[in-house]
Amino acid sequence: MEWRFVNRRATLFVEKPFNITEEVLPLYASEFAKMGLLPSVNKGVGVKITPAGLVTENILSLDLKRLDETLKVNFGPDRVDFESSSPNETWQSFHDVVVKLEEILTKKLNHRIVRLALCGLVFYKMSDEQLATAYEKLAKSEGEQPVEWLFRKVLRSVLESEDKKVHQVVNNVYALTSNTAALGMKGDKGVSLDMDVNTMHGASAENIATIQELFWQDAARVIEKAVANYQKVFADGTED
C-alpha cells in the first residue's frame, strides 16, 4: 500500500507570552535568518485589560519560512509551531532542526519552555474499495457506506527521566479520517493518520528541560509504530 508523510510538526509552548514589538523584531528575524528562514510580519489590533478598562493596541504576528516552503515557523501568543513538508525529511533530521530552533528560543531570546508536542500527518492512498474495507475493519461493521468518517482515540503514558526523579504524563492522540480534501489533499482518496504526542499542561520548565530529549525520541518512536501498525491494519485487519 502506498503511503507518505505529508508533514512533521513540533510545538514549543513558552512560559510567558511572546511580545513581538518593532524593537525586538530585528533580533527574531536575524536569529532565524541563520537557518534560511525569511520573516513575514502582519499587523493586527488586540485588546488588553488595564486598570482604566479595555485598551486597544497594535499587535505584530510573525511567521517564517524557507523559500521552497518546506519549513515553516509560526508564532502564536504562547507557542511556536514548526512544520516540515520536505519529502526527504526523517525524524532525525527534523529533530536536528527543532533543536536548533529551540536553542534560538531559549538561549538567544530567553524563553522558557513548559510544554512540548510532536506530530505527524500520514496519508495512505486507497481505492474506493480499499476505503470501504478499511472502514469496515475500523468500525467493525458491514454494509455501511458513510460519505466521510473519523476515528479518534487518546492514550496516556508516563515518561521517566534517567534519574527517575521526573515523571511526565504524555498524551498520545490518534485521529484517522477519510475526509482528505479537508487536509488539502484534493484529488487523492485514502485515509489520513494525524498523530499528536504532547506533554500535559502544568509541567515546570525545569522538568521539561530534563525530559525533552527523551520526549523527542520516544514521541518519534510512538508515531512510527502507529504508522506501521495502521498499514498492517489496512492490509490484513489486525491491530496491535
Image (cartoon, rainbow, N blue to C red):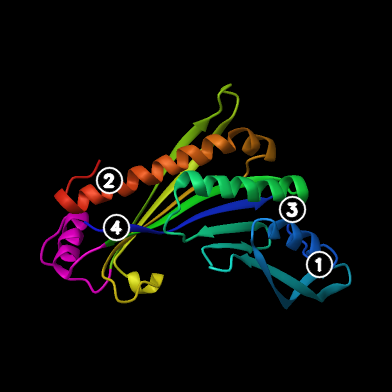
Where disc 2 sits, the SS reads: helix
Residue most extreme to the right: 52
* Residue type marked 4: Trp
Residue 64 showing in the rendered view? yes
Cα gap from disc 1 to disc 2, whole angstroms: 46 Å
Q: Where does label 4 land, which residue? A: 3
Q: Which numbered marker is on residue 229?
A: 2
Q: Nearer the viewer, mark 2 or mark 4?
A: 4
Q: Where does label 3 land, which residue? A: 16
Q: Position of residue 5 (x, y in %)?
A: 38, 57
Where disc 4 sits, the SS reads: strand
Q: Nearer the viewer, mark 3 or mark 2?
A: 2
> Which residue sits at x=21%, y=71%?
146
Magenta stretch, residue numbers: 125-148
Q: Which numbered marker is on residue 77?
A: none
Earlier sequence position, callout 1 versus callout 4: 4
Cα gap from disc 1 to disc 3, whole angstroms: 15 Å
Cα gap from disc 1 to disc 4, whole angstroms: 43 Å
Residue 199 showing in the rendered view? no
Earlier sequence position, callout 1 versus callout 3: 3
Asked whether residue 134 is drawn in magenta, I would say yes
Earlier sequence position, callout 2 versus callout 4: 4
